[in-house]
Image: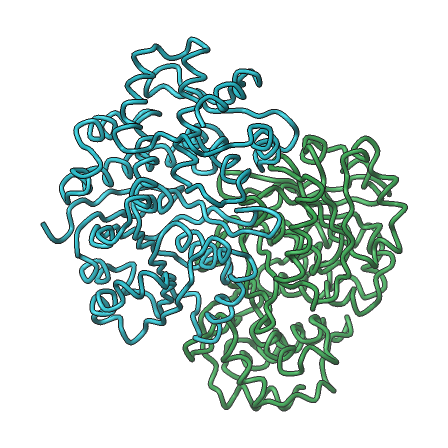
Chain colours: A green, B cyan
């Protein structure tokens, strides 16, 4: 099952763009007008992907080879920095990328954020095209236009809303993904399922960690997740309200990662833990029935996402939550569920309850 | 004649903002909802203005004093840099400026660009309020949402479109302006006059360099220029076409500044020279009558804007023009006039003619 499988249209303000989902179809995707019409093309490619798929990518270039410039990025999170971005912006000038140029990021969420920031800030914004190579980037971070880089004092402090001109999700890249990386993506799809994406929730329940990796299942998962996320973002591009339901599990997840200095816990593990804590707190607050909570917990278990062994310092997590950029000023507000698929925002959880649940689960 | 004199509404995409023009009315302006509704206020203030008007500004704070944080900027052009911005973004974090914060820039064009960039990139964009303190910033750079910082390899390479939430043009700040700084602003108003702002052109013809500094004349000049520029920007926020008429004289002006390493020539002198070269070239190409060219030259003379003595290296200017960020790719396109008030864009000038006129005039 090679080639283009799904095309999903997304609108962003007055413009719109396509998200292509397919298998081994990079060459076709590079024939799209959004790519070919550029005068010069700056590729920012993950060093890991360059190593594994360099030949695949270069073969896919075809007619655009002569105007393509490759910049390799060692895509560790610490390189997704404001300072590291300066080097790439200078390279763009050196290669005479102009306002009719385009940036194409090939890699996971780090590359997408980084390439999007560079494109959005270069000459007051040139187009960016995302070629996500991880499941997490395909189902979540490549969609919605949030891009950012880190300062030493905090993650994602400097950033923009810069909607992509095109997203190319080529499932061929997923073949080399480790199980943990794959799970990081499943967590975000599951999140979509819990806040209203019924089709994804059912797909996850019909499959398991092995079967979901088949081309048919994974293309369905990616395209459903993308459709759901675009439908949310379209209604609230700049996160004035509705879009914040996408933060479900993330305020806690970020605080968990941050409290551990981003060591010994993946983003997916942290967010899965955040979601499980929220589910349990919602259950004890009488918002979710036992049946609903058990349904979610069964899914977390099925995909190997039950936390445990995280060895959290609960007080430390609480402090990091207060420092979270959305929460300067004291109050910690959460997205909670009042039923599966029914998120509601700006909810407080009694601090005692939150701490107790956290200590029990993690 | 103290207090608010004019309020000009500007729309930008789906939002809108006000530009206030008045005299010694900073305290009233700080009572506006756009200011008072912020949880924390980050002031970026020019060191020169801090020295001359520090007490005036602090007295104007009133009720917002308790949530105001001052960051002084030595506003030399070389400090309007990507690297220098990092320090301010880190300071914002240190002072817990959050998404409900606002940045207020008090200074000339350098401070406005810098404060606008910091606000636009901080946490994916928080509001910026401009308090321009030079005539150039009041009539031109504070309006339209173009903000940028420099890389060592080029000026204004990194930037955004970030429309202000409010612009406060307090004429009191102009009292300390040097004659050269004042002329830098006159040049931009004159540019507006030449590309369609008849009211401003007449005002300039009715006055001279002394009389235009009176409160009544200068408030008329600022408000007319602001009205004209907002009317252009509203129709083409992202410079897809029409807005580029505002570059009249600037492609040449930037190349002149750049060819001299930004030494020994002010921005205003360079742009005035660029305009005069264009006028003369337009005349020789039969686009402007002698009468029209003489009318413009008389105005340039009246305001002491006739170049001469610039000692230009014509070949060097030509090379810098080719390197201009709008022109990677070879062709140098200009805005020309086919009559006073009638700009047309993307025009070529025969290279020989351009060089000859440049050598004769400068």
Between B306 and A37, the one nearer to me in the picture: B306
Q: How many marks?
A: 0
Specify whether A169 is left or right of B246. right
On the rendered structure, is A2 left or right of B127?
right
Relative vertical location of residue A74 with respect to residue A357 in this rendering, above or below: above
Residue closer to the observer: A90 or A354: A90
Relative to A346, residue B106 above or below: above
Where does residue B304 sit, x and y in percent of width and height? 30, 33
Q: Identify the image quadrant of residue B135.
A: top left
Q: Is residue A199 visible?
A: no
Quadrant containing the N terminus of chain A is: top right
Q: Position of residue A282 (x, y in %)?
A: 54, 78
Answer with left or right where residue A339 lies relative to residue A199: left
Name the residue at 71% across, 36% down.
Answer: A40
Question: Residue A20 at what x, y percent from top left?
Answer: 71, 42
The one of B163 and A170 positioned closer to us in this rendering: B163
Whether residue B56 is visible: yes
Q: Is residue A24 above or below residue A314?
A: above
Residue A239 % position (x, y): 48, 58
Is residue A246 positioned above or below B148 on the image? below
């Amino acid at each position: 099952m090679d080639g283009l499988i799904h095309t999903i249209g997304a609108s962003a303000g007055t413009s719109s763009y396509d998200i292509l989902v397919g298998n081994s179809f990079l060459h076709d995707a590079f024939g799209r007008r959004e790519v070919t019409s550029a005068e010069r093309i700056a590729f920012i490619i993950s060093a890991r992907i360059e190593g594994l798929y360099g030949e695949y990518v270069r073969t896919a270039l075809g007619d655009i080879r002569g105007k393509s410039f490759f910049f390799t990025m060692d895509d560790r999170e610490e390189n997704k920095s404001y300072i590291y971005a300066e080097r790439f912006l200078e390279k763009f000038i050196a290669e005479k990328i102009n306002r009719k140029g385009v940036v194409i990021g090939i890699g996971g969420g780090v590359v997408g954020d980084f390439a999007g920031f560079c494109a959005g800030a270069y000459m007051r914004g040139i187009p960016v095209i995302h070629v996500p190579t991880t499941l997490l980037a395909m189902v979540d971070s490549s969609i919605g236009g949030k891009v950012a880089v880190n300062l030493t004092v905090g993650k994602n402090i400097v950033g923009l809303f810069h909607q992509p001109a095109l997203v190319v999700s080529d499932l061929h890249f997923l073949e080399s993904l480790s199980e943990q990386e794959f799970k990081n993506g499943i967590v975000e799809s599951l999140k979509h399922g819990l806040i209203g994406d019924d089709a994804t929730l059912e797909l996850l329940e019909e499959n398991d960690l092995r079967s979901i990796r088949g081309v048919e299942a994974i293309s369905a998962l990616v395209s459903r997740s993308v459709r759901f996320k675009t439908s949310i973002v379209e209604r609230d591009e700049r996160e004035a309200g509705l879009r914040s339901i996408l933060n479900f599990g993330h305020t806690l997840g970020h605080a968990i990662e941050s409290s551990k200095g981003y060591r010994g816990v993946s983003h997916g593990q942290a967010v899965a833990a955040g979601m499980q804590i929220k589910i349990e707190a919602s259950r004890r607050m009488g918002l979710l029935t036992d049946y609903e909570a058990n349904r979610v917990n069964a899914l977390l278990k099925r995909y190997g996402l039950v936390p445990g062994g995280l060895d959290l310092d609960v007080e430390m997590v609480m402090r990091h939550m207060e420092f979270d950029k959305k929460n300067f000023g004291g109050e910690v507000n959460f997205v909670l569920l009042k039923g599966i698929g029914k998120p509601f925002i700006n909810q407080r959880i009694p601090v005692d309850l939150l701490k107790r649940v956290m200590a029990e689960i993690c």
